[in-house]
Amino acid sequence: MASSLTLLMKTIFLVLIFVSFAISPATSTAPEECESESSNPCVNKTKALPLKIIAITTILISSMIGVGAPLFSRSVPFLRPDGNIFTVVKCFASGIILGTGFMHVLPDSFDMLSSKCLEDNPWHKFPFSGFLAMLSGLVTLVIDSMATSLYTSKNAVGIMPHGHGHGHGPANDVTLPTTKDDDHATAQLLRYRVIAMVLELGIIVHSVVIGLSLGATNDTCTIKGLIAALCFHQMFEGMGLGGCILQAEYTNMKKFVMAFFFAVTTPFGIALGIALSTVYKDNSPTALITVGLLNACSAGLLIYMALVDLLAAEFMGPKLQGSIKMQFKCFVAALIGCGGMSILAKWA
């Protein structure tokens, strides 16, 4: 059920990408200066390519470190998943995801869809970025709710087999209701799995988009600044996703697959941008509309997940509700995460 639902949602987003590329040229025209080559002295295709190769390598390593660190935290006693330190780290990572949505993805969408290279009607007459982000948040809520219902019905929470012996009579196949604690633990595990699945979807879409933009540009000044910023960005965002994957208690193979997809999406986006650099232009209407719409959708998803499924669930849970001191520590951690991403917004 998990794999099929994840595949379905990824397929939907891929279809949206291709549809956006298909309809954008037909729905927009641009002034000549928006299609012409930039006169920026930093634009140098020959020098940009080695920098892009460096970006692929460094961002891949940073992403692997970020998403992998939480998965190996069980071997570190003070970072065990049920400990206070791990809870504080989770809130820090959740703050990073929230900051990514508000300070990176959503502003980029507003900038792109309000560009002078797009026609006034309809792009300058309606706030598409805010509208799509709002709609994306609501759609994420529906997916979140439906996925939880599907998981719950599939796993039959509240019933577990007992007493299987060597005989074949009815007495040996008795099913007994579990305790309330067992029900709560199972339901919570299902929620963690839905959260990890939906969160990865939003992060993957965002990661491909930022990788595509970096790979397509030949501005060496921009690339140099982006490499360092994106390394930190992907590392900390990976920590947030890795923590969710750890709590979901997937098999080792599923953990590896989810971590792998996160780690390779930005490098894949860069490689795709390099391949399309001859036809893909950052300031063309096709690129502005496609990436702007995807950023708006991704922003709504990330903001919803960070606030509702991560921070609100943590702060309203029994551990933090039972300790004002822990609430304060987690709030400061989330604030630092948001603040860090806000600072990085100057460069990325």
Image: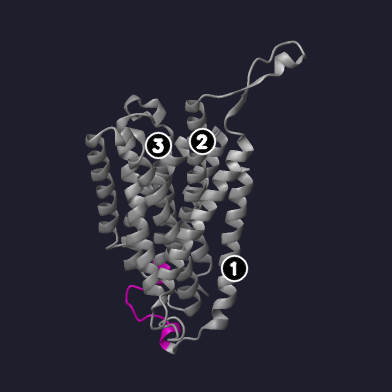
Q: What stretch is highlighted in magenta?
A: 33-47
Q: Residue at x 77, y 14 (%)?
A: 169
Query: For residue 36: magenta?
Result: yes
Please tell me whether residue 149 is drawn above or below residue 222 in the rendered image: above
Q: Which is more toward the observer, 69 or 13?
A: 13
Image position, residue 19 (x, y; %): 59, 70
Q: Distance between the residues labelled 1 and 2?
A: 37 Å
Q: Which residue is drawn at 54% across and 53% down?
A: 143
Image position, residue 92 (x, y; %): 31, 44
Image position, residue 200 (x, y; %): 49, 49
Q: How far apart are marks 3 and 1 (CA)?
A: 34 Å
Residue that mark 2 sits on: 187
- Say what amino acid the circle numbered 3 marks: Pro
- Say what amino acid the circle numbered 1 marks: Phe
Image position, residue 226 (x, y; %): 34, 60
- Say what amino acid the circle numbered 2 marks: Ala
Label tally? 3
Q: Majority secondary structure of the magenta segment?
A: loop
Tag shown at residue 280:
none
Query: Which comes before the other along the chain, label 1 or label 2?
Result: 1
Tag shown at residue 18:
1
Q: In which quarter of the image is the N terminus?
A: top right
Residue that mark 3 sits on: 70
Query: Which comes before the other along the chain, label 2 or label 3?
Result: 3
Q: Looking at the image, which residue sits at the far bottom?
A: 32
Left or right of 256: which side holds 234? left
